[in-house]
Image (cartoon, rainbow, N blue to C red):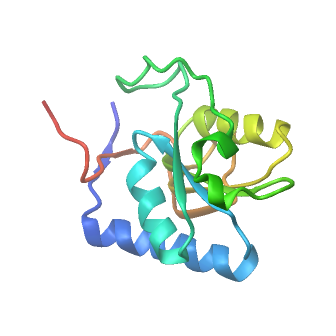
């Protein structure tokens, strides 16, 4: 059983997204696309894309391990170029910021970033929360939390 339940509000999410966007613009300018991983990464990805004035695209992917009820994705990641507006095609490798809400085990964001890196793209990763001891370390995160102590409930999640 988790000891601490963290329930960030919308203001917290905005603060975290601003932190990531500011860190990105200072250290890695020139990102072509913000890639949001469904479901949890969509809202932070859209906020970050607005803050950076960079287009956002989405991918559906979920690791088969870990908690959550979104394990139904077929996990076939699209070619990013095929998901964007034809008028914005960029020749050569893309610079991508892949966003998820949390890096828990690190499997989901690690798989997605690895897949796009193997396609030849330059990949950076960001999560609002990064759990200490994850098998993957995002390039950017807002808060690092204890692996076994915190359970995050985001404002876009509903309890049934």
Left or right: where 156 falls relative to 32: left
Residue 77 horizontal/vertical position (percent): 63, 30
Image height of 23 relative to 109, above or below: below
Q: Nearer the viewer, residue 82 or 144?
A: 82
Residue at position x 43%, y 60% in the image: 46
Residue at position x 76%, y 37% in the image: 114
Residue 154 horizontal/vertical position (percent): 30, 50
Q: Nearer the viewer, residue 37 or 147?
A: 37
Q: Quadrant of residue 139?
A: bottom right
Q: Quadrant of residue 34?
A: bottom right
Residue 127 horizontal/vertical position (percent): 54, 55
Farthest residue toward the left?
A: 160
Farthest residue toward the front?
A: 87
Image height of 49 relative to 135, above or below: below
Residue 156 horizontal/vertical position (percent): 25, 49
Q: Quadrant of residue 89?
A: bottom right
Residue at position x 81%, y 43% in the image: 117
Quarter of the picture containing the N terminus is: top left
Left or right: where 48 falls relative to 135: left
Q: Nearer the viewer, residue 4 or 23?
A: 23
Image height of 10 relative to 25, above or below: above
Quarter of the picture containing the C terminus is: top left
Left or right: where 121 falls relative to 155: right
Q: Nearer the viewer, residue 38 or 88?
A: 88
């Amino acid at each position: 059983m988790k000891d601490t339940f963290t329930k960030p509000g919308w203001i917290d999410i905005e603060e975290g997204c601003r932190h990531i966007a500011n860190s990105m613009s200072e250290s890695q300018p020139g990102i072509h696309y913000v890639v949001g991983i469904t479901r949890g990464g969509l809202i932070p990805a859209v906020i970050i894309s607005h803050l950076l004035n960079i287009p956002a695209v989405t991918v559906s992917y979920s690791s088969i391990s870990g908690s959550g009820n979104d394990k139904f994705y077929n996990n076939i990641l699209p070619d990013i170029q095929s998901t964007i507006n034809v008028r914005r095609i960029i020749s050569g490798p893309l610079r991508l910021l892949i966003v998820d809400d949390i890096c828990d085990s690190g499997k989901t964001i690690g798989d997605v970033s690895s897949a796009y890196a193997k396609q030849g793209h330059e990949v950076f990763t960001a999560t609002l929360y990064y759990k200490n001891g994850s098998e993957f370390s995002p390039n950017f995160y807002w808060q690092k939390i204890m692996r076994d102590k915190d359970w995050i409930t985001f404002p876009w999640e509903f309890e049934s």
